[in-house]
Image (spheres, rainbow, N blue to C red):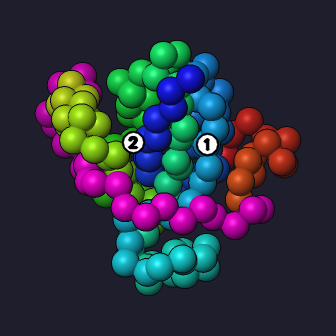
Amino acid sequence: MKQEIATFAAGCFWGVEAMFRRLDGVLDAAVGYTGGQTADPDYKAVCQGDTGHAEAVEVCFDPARISYEELLTAFWECHNPTTRNRQGPDVGSQYRSAIFCHGPKQRTTAEASREQHQLKIGLHHPIVTEIVAADAFYQAEEYHQRYLEKHGRAHC
């Protein structure tokens, strides 16, 4: 079985992780931090905004069962990509909307998907989602992994 990795930031990582885990073809998902300048950050430092990292989810998927395009559709639908550094009550650059691409094919696909989603929602609300090359991904502390599942909650 071939496996691929996709990395997304869409606000608080707990709900994003739970959403991706429910998709058929997703083999695993882990929450963590990426896109910043500090090596091996922890939750406290990321929340203080000192590291430049986003709360993100690294998704391991089987492309024979779910496509990267389908993951992108789920990403666009699970958050508001038109608010800079904010999702609901969560404010700060760690809650930014971003797609961290693992290679040029993912980047091209993500950019085309962003254009399609922009047309779908209309031009009066510009999408601010960053599309950048994937960088080091640091898994969050164990108590954040499967957080909603551990606490018997379906969503945040």
Q: Nearer the viewer, residue 64 or 19?
A: 64
Going from the N terminus, do you reach mark 1 or mark 2 first?
A: 1
- Residue 58 placed where, x, y %? 52, 48
Query: Was residue 103 drawn as part of the magenta stretch in this picture?
Result: no
Numbered label attached to residue 80: 2
For residue 152, above or below residue 62: below
Q: Nearer the viewer, residue 87 or 147?
A: 147
Residue beneath the point at 74% across and 36% down = 154
Which of pointers 1 and 2 indicates the residue nearer the eye?
1
Q: CA distance from mark 1 to mark 2?
A: 21 Å
Which amino acid type is marked by label 2? Asn
For residue 36, above or below residue 83: below
Query: Was residue 123 drawn as part of the magenta stretch in this picture?
Result: yes
Q: Judging from the image, what secondary structure is the residue with disc 1 in? A: strand
Find disc 1 in the rendering and name its residue.
Answer: 29
In the picture as drawn, the residue positioned furthest to the top comes out as: 65
